[in-house]
Amino acid sequence: MTSLLPDADWRHRPGLDALLAALGAAEGHARFVGGAVRDGLLGLPVSDLDIATDLTPQSVIDRLKTAGIKAVPTGIDHGTITAVIHGWPVEITTLRRDVSTDGRRATIAYTGDWREDAARRDFTINALYAHPVTHEITDFFDGVADLQAHRVRFIGDPRARIAEDHLRILRYFRFLARFGDEQPDDEAYAACRTAAKSLMALSRERIADELLKLLAVAAPLASLQLMVDGGILLPVMPEVDQNSLDQLSTLIVRETASATAPSALRRLAALLPRDPRIADQVGARLKLSNKARKRLTTALEAPASGIPPRALAFTIGMEGAIDRILLDPAAPLDGLAMLENWTPPRLPLGGGVLIARGLQPGPDVAKALAEVQAVWVAEGFPDDIRLAEIADQTVSKFQRARQ
């Protein structure tokens, strides 16, 4: 692991040099920090860029204004200004120290001490700074060595870090899944187990956000196993047990075998009992969006096996069909190939066509149209000639019923 930040495309984005110049980076007033440095050292893509500075928030705003760079006070109460360069947001945060914390939020004070700012962060691999000009890494707590060893370690006493922000329990297991070697630090694991009930004090939105980020990691099972074994999720997700992990394991195997991109919501569905009512209750508890809750319940309403994949996609949508096929171990994976590059068609006739064929206007029209569609879908969306035959047969059936 080098002590210099490797060159990468993100460091050459339009407007970044002008932003750094406005902040006085060459004079030492600004450094890259956190995920961009961590992921940059690992050669991973960098999407979000954070900059730490010893300038006050007002000074940051003034400097950006002078340079003609848009500044948005997105988190000014906590010292964060968002600079927008060519449509790309960059968060700039003044060096801070915690004055007091209650496990959910912190009262902060500004500082000019880079080490003091680093000490308030959660893990050693997230407390890395890089000079934007010299590219030299500043590492106060051996984060580079931990990154190289695939070791996720709290800064200082894990119990104290967790007491400052209970969400760090969930963050620990997410970072372990993404950057660790699946072996937890004993002291950290013990602290997470002891403090698990403190998760109940967090907003459900924060819990959901962190849980979904964990499920989006390529290989989350080892971390989730530790969480189930240690009772970490029990206070906030009692539905998740060993059977849940077995279901998720099966899903991940099927995602991999079918080369389907992982979905955090689909994986959340895999962790739940096969009951859409429970899925809706969990979605409500986690305060997921209505769209996300609907996806969970749709995924668990019925197994996919026995239903033609395209008929399923026509009925519940492409996303829902893919979820159901992957979540049903009995559903052949080759059904997914039938959905690739296929768009569910619309029934190319309406009630007026049935009336023109002799069906009396009234409530029978909607019923007959539904029946035509059901046969059309069951037969695999045949051409217009066959559809006309289905329409004629359906109209005749309803006419006979009226005689």
Image: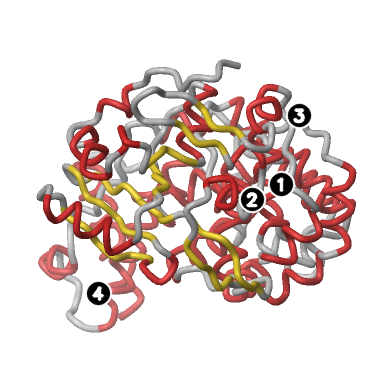
Q: Secondary structure at mark 4?
A: helix
First in residue order: circle 2 vs circle 4? 2
Q: Nearer the viewer, residue 277 or 312?
A: 277
Q: Is residue 280 visible?
A: no
Which label was assigned to residue 365?
A: 4
- The label nearer to you, 3 versus 4, is 3
Across and down, in percent, residue 141 comes to 68, 37
Q: Secondary structure at mark 2?
A: helix
Q: Where's the C terminus, which quadrant?
A: bottom left
- The label nearer to you, 3 versus 1, is 1
Amino acid type at mark 4 = Val
Label 1: which residue? 155
- The residue sitting at 12% across, 68% down in the picture is 352
Which label was assigned to residue 181?
A: 3
Report if the CB atoms under discs 1 and 2 are less than 8 Å apart: yes
Label 2: which residue? 119
